[in-house]
Protein backbone atom coordinates (compact mmCIF):
# COMPACT_ATOMS: atom_id res chain seq x y z
CA UNK A 1 0.00 0.00 0.00
CA UNK A 2 1.11 3.57 -0.65
CA UNK A 3 2.82 4.96 2.44
CA UNK A 4 3.59 1.54 3.92
CA UNK A 5 1.53 -0.98 5.89
CA UNK A 6 -1.59 0.24 7.68
CA UNK A 7 -1.65 -2.41 10.39
CA UNK A 8 0.87 -4.37 12.40
CA UNK A 9 -0.38 -7.84 13.27
CA UNK A 10 1.00 -9.46 16.40
CA UNK A 11 0.56 -13.17 17.03
CA UNK A 12 1.82 -14.92 20.14
CA UNK A 13 3.04 -18.45 19.49
CA UNK A 14 2.67 -21.17 22.13
CA UNK A 15 1.73 -24.72 21.12
CA UNK A 16 0.31 -23.20 17.96
CA UNK A 17 1.91 -25.34 15.26
CA UNK A 18 -1.20 -27.28 14.26
CA UNK A 19 -3.16 -24.15 13.31
CA UNK A 20 -0.44 -22.22 11.47
CA UNK A 21 -1.01 -23.61 7.96
CA UNK A 22 -4.48 -22.04 7.69
CA UNK A 23 -3.42 -18.93 9.61
CA UNK A 24 -0.48 -18.31 7.24
CA UNK A 25 -2.47 -19.06 4.07
CA UNK A 26 -5.00 -16.38 5.04
CA UNK A 27 -2.48 -13.77 6.19
CA UNK A 28 0.18 -14.14 3.45
CA UNK A 29 -1.64 -12.11 0.75
CA UNK A 30 -2.01 -9.15 3.11
CA UNK A 31 1.71 -9.21 3.82
CA UNK A 32 2.58 -9.54 0.13
CA UNK A 33 0.26 -6.66 -0.81
CA UNK A 34 1.94 -4.38 1.76
CA UNK A 35 -1.18 -3.98 3.90
CA UNK A 36 0.20 -5.88 6.89
CA UNK A 37 3.44 -6.10 8.82
CA UNK A 38 3.68 -9.21 10.99
CA UNK A 39 5.47 -9.24 14.34
CA UNK A 40 5.21 -12.78 15.73
CA UNK A 41 6.30 -13.51 19.29
CA UNK A 42 7.69 -16.92 20.20
CA UNK A 43 6.58 -17.20 23.83
CA UNK A 44 9.12 -19.98 24.50
CA UNK A 45 6.79 -22.42 22.77
CA UNK A 46 7.73 -26.06 23.40
CA UNK A 47 6.61 -27.17 19.93
CA UNK A 48 7.82 -26.16 16.46
CA UNK A 49 5.60 -23.07 16.16
CA UNK A 50 8.44 -20.59 15.56
CA UNK A 51 10.14 -22.70 12.87
CA UNK A 52 6.81 -23.36 11.15
CA UNK A 53 5.92 -19.68 11.07
CA UNK A 54 9.28 -18.69 9.57
CA UNK A 55 8.87 -21.39 6.91
CA UNK A 56 5.31 -20.37 6.06
CA UNK A 57 5.78 -16.58 6.35
CA UNK A 58 9.47 -15.80 5.76
CA UNK A 59 8.83 -12.04 5.69
CA UNK A 60 7.52 -12.02 9.24
CA UNK A 61 9.69 -10.69 12.05
CA UNK A 62 10.02 -13.17 14.89
CA UNK A 63 10.59 -11.87 18.42
CA UNK A 64 12.00 -14.40 20.90
CA UNK A 65 10.71 -13.96 24.43
CA UNK A 66 12.97 -16.51 26.11
CA UNK A 67 10.19 -17.46 28.54
CA UNK A 68 6.43 -17.80 28.57
CA UNK A 69 5.24 -14.30 29.45
CA UNK A 70 1.55 -15.06 28.99
CA UNK A 71 -0.65 -13.55 26.31
CA UNK A 72 -0.41 -9.95 27.52
CA UNK A 73 3.34 -10.06 28.12
CA UNK A 74 3.97 -11.69 24.76
CA UNK A 75 1.87 -9.15 22.87
CA UNK A 76 3.51 -6.25 24.67
CA UNK A 77 6.96 -7.30 23.44
CA UNK A 78 5.83 -6.25 19.97
CA UNK A 79 4.26 -2.91 20.90
CA UNK A 80 7.53 -0.84 20.93
CA UNK A 81 8.11 -1.86 17.30
CA UNK A 82 4.65 -0.88 16.05
CA UNK A 83 4.98 2.02 13.59
CA UNK A 84 1.65 1.65 11.80
CA UNK A 85 -1.52 3.52 12.72
CA UNK A 86 -3.21 0.26 13.80
CA UNK A 87 -2.02 -2.64 15.93
CA UNK A 88 -3.97 -5.89 15.67
CA UNK A 89 -3.75 -8.92 17.93
CA UNK A 90 -4.53 -12.07 15.97
CA UNK A 91 -4.60 -15.52 17.54
CA UNK A 92 -2.79 -18.25 15.58
CA UNK A 93 -6.12 -20.06 15.11
CA UNK A 94 -7.72 -17.05 13.39
CA UNK A 95 -7.79 -16.78 9.58
CA UNK A 96 -7.29 -13.07 8.87
CA UNK A 97 -7.59 -12.71 5.10
CA UNK A 98 -6.37 -9.66 3.21
CA UNK A 99 -9.80 -8.53 2.03
CA UNK A 100 -11.18 -8.69 5.55
CA UNK A 101 -8.24 -6.80 7.02
CA UNK A 102 -8.49 -4.10 4.35
CA UNK A 103 -12.19 -3.58 5.12
CA UNK A 104 -11.45 -3.57 8.84
CA UNK A 105 -8.81 -0.85 8.44
CA UNK A 106 -11.19 1.19 6.28
CA UNK A 107 -13.90 0.80 8.95
CA UNK A 108 -11.52 2.04 11.64
CA UNK A 109 -10.60 5.00 9.43
CA UNK A 110 -14.29 5.91 9.23
CA UNK A 111 -14.73 5.64 13.01
CA UNK A 112 -11.99 7.82 14.51
CA UNK A 113 -13.47 7.66 18.02
CA UNK A 114 -13.08 3.87 18.22
CA UNK A 115 -9.99 2.80 20.16
CA UNK A 116 -10.54 -0.97 20.03
CA UNK A 117 -12.65 -3.06 17.68
CA UNK A 118 -13.25 -6.63 16.65
CA UNK A 119 -14.63 -8.12 13.45
CA UNK A 120 -17.40 -10.66 13.73
CA UNK A 121 -16.11 -14.22 14.25
CA UNK A 122 -17.39 -17.63 13.24
CA UNK A 123 -16.18 -21.11 14.00
CA UNK A 124 -14.78 -23.52 11.39
CA UNK A 125 -18.25 -25.09 11.30
CA UNK A 126 -19.76 -21.77 10.23
CA UNK A 127 -21.47 -21.06 13.55
CA UNK A 128 -21.22 -17.46 14.76
CA UNK A 129 -19.07 -16.69 17.80
CA UNK A 130 -20.37 -13.72 19.86
CA UNK A 131 -17.77 -10.99 20.27
CA UNK A 132 -19.73 -8.22 22.02
CA UNK A 133 -19.51 -9.09 25.70
CA UNK A 134 -21.46 -7.51 28.55
CA UNK A 135 -19.96 -5.31 31.20
CA UNK A 136 -19.53 -6.88 34.62
CA UNK A 137 -22.69 -6.85 36.70
CA UNK A 138 -23.86 -8.38 39.96
CA UNK A 139 -27.46 -8.26 38.76
CA UNK A 140 -27.18 -9.88 35.33
CA UNK A 141 -26.49 -13.46 36.53
CA UNK A 142 -29.72 -13.42 38.54
CA UNK A 143 -31.72 -11.86 35.70
CA UNK A 144 -30.48 -14.55 33.31
CA UNK A 145 -31.01 -17.39 35.79
CA UNK A 146 -34.62 -16.33 36.37
CA UNK A 147 -35.10 -15.74 32.61
CA UNK A 148 -36.28 -12.22 33.35
CA UNK A 149 -34.40 -10.84 30.36
CA UNK A 150 -37.22 -12.23 28.19
CA UNK A 151 -39.46 -9.54 29.69
CA UNK A 152 -37.06 -6.69 28.86
CA UNK A 153 -37.72 -4.36 25.91
CA UNK A 154 -35.43 -5.05 22.95
CA UNK A 155 -33.47 -1.83 23.47
CA UNK A 156 -32.64 -2.89 27.05
CA UNK A 157 -31.53 -6.33 25.91
CA UNK A 158 -29.26 -4.69 23.35
CA UNK A 159 -27.77 -2.42 25.99
CA UNK A 160 -27.08 -5.35 28.31
CA UNK A 161 -25.55 -7.44 25.50
CA UNK A 162 -27.23 -10.63 26.60
CA UNK A 163 -26.23 -13.80 24.69
CA UNK A 164 -29.41 -13.73 22.61
CA UNK A 165 -28.70 -10.22 21.36
CA UNK A 166 -27.56 -9.91 17.75
CA UNK A 167 -24.53 -7.70 17.27
CA UNK A 168 -26.22 -5.05 15.19
CA UNK A 169 -24.66 -1.92 16.65
CA UNK A 170 -21.25 -0.54 15.74
CA UNK A 171 -20.25 0.43 19.27
CA UNK A 172 -20.84 -1.54 22.44
CA UNK A 173 -21.03 -0.77 26.13
CA UNK A 174 -18.89 -3.72 27.14
CA UNK A 175 -15.76 -5.55 26.05
CA UNK A 176 -14.34 -7.67 23.23
CA UNK A 177 -12.22 -10.84 23.21
CA UNK A 178 -8.59 -10.55 22.11
CA UNK A 179 -8.76 -13.20 19.39
CA UNK A 180 -8.81 -10.64 16.55
CA UNK A 181 -8.67 -7.26 18.25
CA UNK A 182 -7.59 -4.16 16.33
CA UNK A 183 -6.34 -1.14 18.30
CA UNK A 184 -5.74 2.43 17.21
CA UNK A 185 -2.06 3.10 17.90
CA UNK A 186 -2.93 6.58 19.15
CA UNK A 187 -5.25 5.08 21.75
CA UNK A 188 -2.68 2.51 22.88
CA UNK A 189 -0.08 5.25 23.28
CA UNK A 190 -2.54 7.10 25.53
CA UNK A 191 -3.81 4.29 27.79
CA UNK A 192 -0.94 1.81 27.52
CA UNK A 193 -0.82 -1.76 26.18
CA UNK A 194 -2.18 -4.89 27.86
CA UNK A 195 -1.92 -5.45 31.61
CA UNK A 196 0.84 -8.03 32.07
CA UNK A 197 -0.28 -8.86 35.61
CA UNK A 198 -3.12 -10.78 33.92
CA UNK A 199 -1.16 -13.73 32.53
CA UNK A 200 -3.91 -15.10 30.31
CA UNK A 201 -7.66 -14.40 30.16
CA UNK A 202 -9.14 -11.14 31.37
CA UNK A 203 -6.49 -8.88 29.84
CA UNK A 204 -8.77 -8.04 26.90
CA UNK A 205 -11.65 -7.17 29.26
CA UNK A 206 -9.41 -4.88 31.35
CA UNK A 207 -7.95 -3.22 28.24
CA UNK A 208 -11.41 -2.38 26.90
CA UNK A 209 -12.30 -0.96 30.33
CA UNK A 210 -9.25 1.31 30.33
CA UNK A 211 -9.98 2.44 26.78
CA UNK A 212 -13.57 3.33 27.66
CA UNK A 213 -12.48 5.19 30.79
CA UNK A 214 -10.17 7.30 28.62
CA UNK A 215 -13.08 8.21 26.33
CA UNK A 216 -12.43 5.79 23.45
CA UNK A 217 -15.31 3.78 22.00
CA UNK A 218 -15.35 -0.02 21.71
CA UNK A 219 -16.58 -1.21 18.33
CA UNK A 220 -17.75 -4.25 16.38
CA UNK A 221 -17.16 -4.16 12.63
CA UNK A 222 -20.13 -6.03 11.20
CA UNK A 223 -18.72 -5.75 7.66
CA UNK A 224 -15.95 -8.27 8.35
CA UNK A 225 -16.17 -11.86 9.55
CA UNK A 226 -13.11 -14.00 10.28
CA UNK A 227 -12.83 -17.71 11.08
CA UNK A 228 -11.72 -18.52 14.63
CA UNK A 229 -10.63 -22.01 15.66
CA UNK A 230 -11.73 -21.74 19.33
CA UNK A 231 -8.57 -21.70 21.43
CA UNK A 232 -6.57 -24.52 19.89
CA UNK A 233 -3.33 -23.38 21.58
CA UNK A 234 -4.88 -23.34 25.05
CA UNK A 235 -6.46 -26.74 24.55
CA UNK A 236 -3.14 -28.17 23.35
CA UNK A 237 -1.49 -26.87 26.52
CA UNK A 238 -3.99 -27.66 29.29
CA UNK A 239 -6.75 -30.09 30.07
CA UNK A 240 -10.25 -28.64 29.85
CA UNK A 241 -10.66 -28.32 33.66
CA UNK A 242 -7.30 -26.53 33.92
CA UNK A 243 -8.06 -24.27 30.97
CA UNK A 244 -11.41 -23.37 32.52
CA UNK A 245 -9.77 -22.77 35.92
CA UNK A 246 -7.32 -20.35 34.32
CA UNK A 247 -10.09 -18.62 32.38
CA UNK A 248 -12.21 -18.08 35.49
CA UNK A 249 -9.19 -16.93 37.52
CA UNK A 250 -8.17 -14.49 34.77
CA UNK A 251 -11.62 -12.99 34.42
CA UNK A 252 -11.92 -12.56 38.18
CA UNK A 253 -8.44 -11.05 38.27
CA UNK A 254 -9.58 -8.47 35.74
CA UNK A 255 -12.71 -7.81 37.82
CA UNK A 256 -10.54 -7.16 40.87
CA UNK A 257 -8.43 -4.70 38.89
CA UNK A 258 -11.52 -2.85 37.68
CA UNK A 259 -13.91 -3.00 40.63
CA UNK A 260 -11.97 -4.08 43.70
CA UNK A 261 -11.55 -7.35 45.60
CA UNK A 262 -14.86 -7.31 47.47
CA UNK A 263 -16.89 -6.72 44.30
CA UNK A 264 -15.03 -9.48 42.43
CA UNK A 265 -15.59 -11.91 45.30
CA UNK A 266 -19.32 -11.16 45.22
CA UNK A 267 -19.38 -11.77 41.47
CA UNK A 268 -17.57 -15.11 41.87
CA UNK A 269 -19.95 -16.37 44.54
CA UNK A 270 -23.05 -15.22 42.68
CA UNK A 271 -21.97 -16.50 39.25
CA UNK A 272 -20.84 -19.81 40.72
CA UNK A 273 -24.14 -20.37 42.52
CA UNK A 274 -26.20 -19.49 39.45
CA UNK A 275 -24.18 -21.82 37.22
CA UNK A 276 -24.54 -24.73 39.64
CA UNK A 277 -28.31 -24.19 39.85
CA UNK A 278 -28.54 -23.99 36.05
CA UNK A 279 -26.58 -27.24 35.73
CA UNK A 280 -29.43 -29.02 37.53
CA UNK A 281 -32.01 -27.94 34.93
CA UNK A 282 -32.14 -30.34 31.92
CA UNK A 283 -34.07 -27.72 29.92
CA UNK A 284 -31.06 -25.43 29.72
CA UNK A 285 -29.12 -25.49 26.48
CA UNK A 286 -25.45 -26.39 26.32
CA UNK A 287 -23.47 -28.76 28.49
CA UNK A 288 -24.72 -29.17 32.03
CA UNK A 289 -21.36 -30.70 32.99
CA UNK A 290 -19.50 -27.62 31.70
CA UNK A 291 -21.82 -25.34 33.67
CA UNK A 292 -21.23 -27.39 36.79
CA UNK A 293 -17.45 -27.32 36.36
CA UNK A 294 -17.40 -23.59 35.67
CA UNK A 295 -19.68 -22.91 38.63
CA UNK A 296 -17.37 -24.84 40.95
CA UNK A 297 -14.38 -22.90 39.65
CA UNK A 298 -16.11 -19.58 40.35
CA UNK A 299 -17.04 -20.64 43.87
CA UNK A 300 -13.56 -21.97 44.57
CA UNK A 301 -11.94 -18.73 43.38
CA UNK A 302 -14.43 -16.62 45.31
CA UNK A 303 -13.99 -18.50 48.57
CA UNK A 304 -10.21 -18.54 48.18
CA UNK A 305 -10.11 -14.78 47.61
CA UNK A 306 -12.37 -14.25 50.62
CA UNK A 307 -10.04 -16.28 52.89
CA UNK A 308 -7.06 -14.14 51.84
CA UNK A 309 -8.70 -10.76 52.40
Image (cartoon, helix red, strand yellow):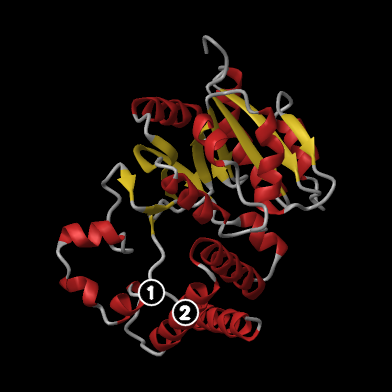
Task: Quickly name the residue at label 2.
Answer: 266
Tell me residue 246's x, y (percent): 63, 68
The reply to whether the C-beta atoms of the residues labelled 2 and 1 are less than 8 Å apart is yes
As helix, strand or loop, the secondary structure at mark 1 comes to loop
Tell me residue 221's x, y (percent): 36, 39
Q: Please tell me how many numbered marks the rendered image carries.
A: 2
* Residue 97 seen in the figure: no
Q: Is the residue 303 above or below the residue 210 in the image? A: below
Question: Which quarter of the rendering shows the C terminus?
Answer: bottom right
Q: Is the residue 275 above or below the residue 107 in the image? A: below
Tell me residue 295's x, y (percent): 50, 81
Q: Is the residue 292 above or below the residue 89 in the image? A: below
Residue 99's quadrant in the figure? top left
Q: Residues within 10 Å of mark 1 (few under 14, many from 20)?
A: some
Q: CA distance from mark 2 to mark 1?
A: 7 Å
Task: Quickly name the residue at label 1.
Answer: 138
The front one of 188 and 49 is 188
Residue drawn 69% across and 28% down?
81
User: Which label's residue is closer to the chain start, 2 or 1?
Assistant: 1
Residue drawn 32% across and 84% down?
283
Residue 42's quadrant in the figure? top right
* Residue 244 seen in the figure: yes
Q: In the displayed structure, does residue 217 sit left or right of residue 185?
A: left
Residue 58's quadrant in the figure? top right
Tell me residue 254's x, y (percent): 55, 62
Q: Residues within 10 Å of mark 2 (few under 14, many from 20)?
A: some
Amino acid sequence: MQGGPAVTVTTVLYNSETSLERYAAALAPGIEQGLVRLLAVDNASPDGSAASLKRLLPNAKLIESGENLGFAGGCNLAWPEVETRYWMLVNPDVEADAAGLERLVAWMDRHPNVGLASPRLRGPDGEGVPVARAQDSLVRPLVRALRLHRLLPARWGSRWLLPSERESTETVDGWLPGAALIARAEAVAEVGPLDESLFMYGEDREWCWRMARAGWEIGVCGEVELVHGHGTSARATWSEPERMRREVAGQLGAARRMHGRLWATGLALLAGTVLLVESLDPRRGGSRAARRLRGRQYLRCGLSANRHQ
